[in-house]
Every structure is written in structure tokens, then in C-alpha cells.
Image (tube, rainbow, N blue to C red):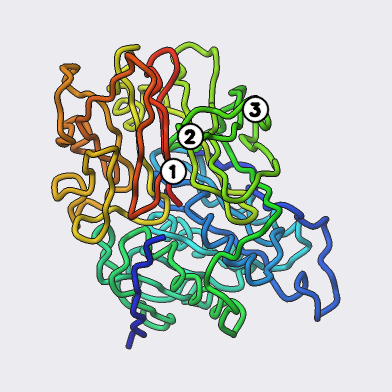
Amino acid sequence: MAKRVKLYIIVPVLLLSCVAMLYSAPKSGASSDASSPGYRFAPVIFIHGFLGSGDTWASQVQRFTSNGVPAGKLFAYDWNSMGRGGDGNAMLKSFVDSVLTLTGGTGVHLVGHSAGGGRAYSYLSSPERAATVISYVHIGSGAQRAPAGPDGSVPTLNIYSDADMVVRGGDIPGAQNVILEGADHYEVATSADAFAEMYRFFYGEPPSVTTITGSDRIRIGGRAVTLGTNQPATGVTVDLYVAGSDGNSDGEPVASFTIPESGNWGPVEVEPETNYMFHIRSERQGFRNLYYYFEPFVRDNPLVYLRTFPPPVSMAGMLLAGLPSDDETGVIAIFSSSQAVIHGRDNLFLNDFELSTPELAGENATSISFFCFDDGRDGQGDAEPVALFAAMPFLQGANIPVFTGQEQTWYANFNGRTIPVRNFRSRTEGVVIAVFW
């Protein structure tokens, strides 16, 4: 019988990448002192789902560190969920081996969400690979006939939701099964209740807190990768600015990075209760410059991802190639990183244009990204769905006339939280993306 957990919605996302390491990662060789956190906490590796990246797990990583889990024991694995990328099991094994070498550990905990659950079950089918996995958490992924590992040998926690409209979950015989009532396909992985179940499963006791506790000194970092494939955005320049209340950059960049082969950037120290804007730019032919606006950071976050547009040879690339690229119109996208936007439960607006409508945010759509632009190039539009996005999961297009004739501030408002952005010209300046945690 599955354990039922009532989820209360609290309003306040291919190639093997390099390890997305949190700060203060230890040198090889774990402490032998059984009373130290480094000895108690085995490494945890999180695997994202389709179209996802490591930032799927940003909120959970911050909850783990809020409970004293060392940052250097938490890792996100990026993979190409959209197509070919070599031997997936071999690449994941290389990643696991790298984590064990770095931390000096002998085993890891694995967590897989959605398609990442299928990736994990395949990986754990081998006795050799399963031998270094202490336990496995299967989240928002398909029901299996037994726990993971050969003959179901790997202790498995199976978390799913009755409100998941993407994957129909179910009990796994022999596993520890937990139902999160009312959680959408992303919340089932990112919610505080999911965190509490994972923590208890790993460590045999409940966490001290399930919130993300704040800090006065905050460092952030992450990766710049191509949407969908997670290929590093090598050679791209990233400028980080404080964003003013009008969406404009406030003075000179706080920091600038040229993205290396790993795709990693940072760390850089930022202030609490402050909005930041990232300008991603390149002289590469066909590259779309981007402006990312984030809600204020609360504590150290090493999983801040900056996605660039893929070339128009992939499914996602062909879709995004249809966005406007001219100096008369702008493109403003809104990304909800931890939950879907659902009509009747959530409220999402861009200025006075509602995006949380039945047409854009129906219960079955599981919409997390909304691309807003003048679809007809006619100055008309009232957030009607854009046909270009009709066949793409999780993404929506809304017909909204974003003019660029004069500088304006636009306001993205999600459940009472607001991010002010600028109406940049889509061709010579770039596409705008507002990110809600």
C-alpha cells in the first residue's frame, strides 16, 4: 500500500557534461571520522528528465545544504534527453566513477526524474554498475515491476503523484512507494515534500527543515548549455549585472565569464534581495543573444543554468528559429523552474496579459515556459496560443505585441512575485527570459 502524503501548494527544468560540482567540494579521500558530516553523507547524483538540465534540482540541493549536507556531496548529471549521445550507461558510469574519485566514497545515492528514471533503471541493470549505488529514488517516472538493480537488489524509493499529467506513476512492488497528492510533473521532483521523503530515505531520519534557509553571503555558479542537448555553450561570453527596478542593468557588470569547454561558470558572490540579469552574447554567426533575469538568490546556488538556443537542426532548434528576429519586435519568455503553471491554481501575467489561461495553462498541458511575441507582426494580440508551439511539450507561445520602438519596462508576475524586464530588440539585442524559482 502506498503511503499518501498531502501536498499543499505553496506559492512563494545529449552529452555527458562535466561534474556540476557544488562549492567547497572536498579533495579525494573522505574523512574517516564517523561523527563528521563528510563521513555520514554519501554523494548524491541527480538525473534530470526530458528537455531538462541540472537546475531541475536547484531547490532540492539548497534544501539539502540547509540541513547540513556538505555541498561537495551533491551533484547534477546533464545528459542529452533528445537524441543520440553515445552509450548512455557508459557515460553515466564515467560520471559516477568521477564522483567517487572526487569524494573518496565507495557508493552513491542516485535520483532520477521522469526520463531520468528510465536512464537510471537501465544503468542499474548491470551488477557491476549497481554495486556502487547505495540506494535509488525514482521520481515522476514510469512504474516498474521491481526495485532497481539486478533482481531488485538496490533499495528503491518510488515517488509519484496522482496529478502528474505527463507520466502515469504507480506502485513498484518491493519498493518504498510514496504518493504526493496534487503535485504536477515538476513539483513531484522539486517540492518540499519530495525533499523530506528523499532525506528520510537516505539518512533514516526527517530533515530539520524543509525550507531553503537564507544566507547573508551567497555564491552562485552553474553552466551555460544548449537547450535540450546540454552541450556546453563554449566560447560564449556571460556578463552579470545588478538589475534595476526598471529592468535595466545597474552600472558595470558585477562579473564577466568566457564559457570554457566544460560549460561551467562561476562562482561569483551576489547580494541577497537583489535581482540580477545575465547577458549571454557571442559574435558567432546565427547565435541569438539572451538576457536572463532571475528572482533574488537566497543561499549558495551552483545550479544556475543559462540555456542558449540550439541550431535549427534539432526539434527545439527548429521551433525557436521561428521566433521573431527583428528590431521592431521583442521576445519575452517566462520560465517557471519548479512547477507547471496551471489555470485555476496559478496566476501568471506579462503586464496585463494573462498567460495562466485554459488555452495556455490547461491542467493537461504541464506548461513551464511561455514565449511571448507579436506572432502576426501586426501589433495585435491578446495572449492567444501560437500554433508554432502546439506540438512541443512543456513550452507555449503567446501572441503578445512586445514593441521595441521605445524603451519600456515589462513586468512578469507569477503568483504575486514580480520580475521587471526590458523590451530588448530581438535581433540586435536579444531574447529576454524571466526565471521564477
Q: Position of residue 249 (x, y in %)?
A: 54, 28
Residue 415 left/right relative to 223: left
The correct choice, above or below, for 261 with respect to 367 in the image is: above
Q: Earlier in the sequence, mark 3 or mark 2?
A: 3
Q: Residue at x 45, y 36 (%)?
A: 229
Disc 1 element: strand
The correct choice, above or below, for 279 with respect to 370 in the image is: above
Q: Nearer the viewer, mark 3 or mark 2?
A: 3
Disc 2 element: strand
Q: Is the residue marked by circle 1 packed among few (<14), some (14-19), or many (20+) residues within 10 Å?
A: some
How many numbered markers are drawn?
3
Q: Position of residue 135 (x, y in %)?
A: 56, 73
**Furthest residue toward bottom:** 1
Q: Earlier in the sequence, mark 3 or mark 1?
A: 3
Q: Are marks 1 and 2 in contact (CB under 8 Å)?
A: yes
Disc 3 element: loop
Circle 3 is placed at which residue position?
253
**Which quarter of the rendering shows the N terminus?**
bottom left
Label disc, if present, on residue 403 of the rendered structure: none
The correct choice, above or below, for 406 with respect to 216 in the image is: above
Report the Cα–Cα distance between label 1 and label 2.
7 Å
Circle 1 is placed at which residue position?
435
Circle 2 is placed at which residue position?
292
Residue 85 left/right relative to 395: right
Q: Amino acid at mark 1?
A: Val
Report the Cα–Cα distance between label 3 and label 2.
14 Å
Q: Residue at x 51, y 56 (%)?
A: 57
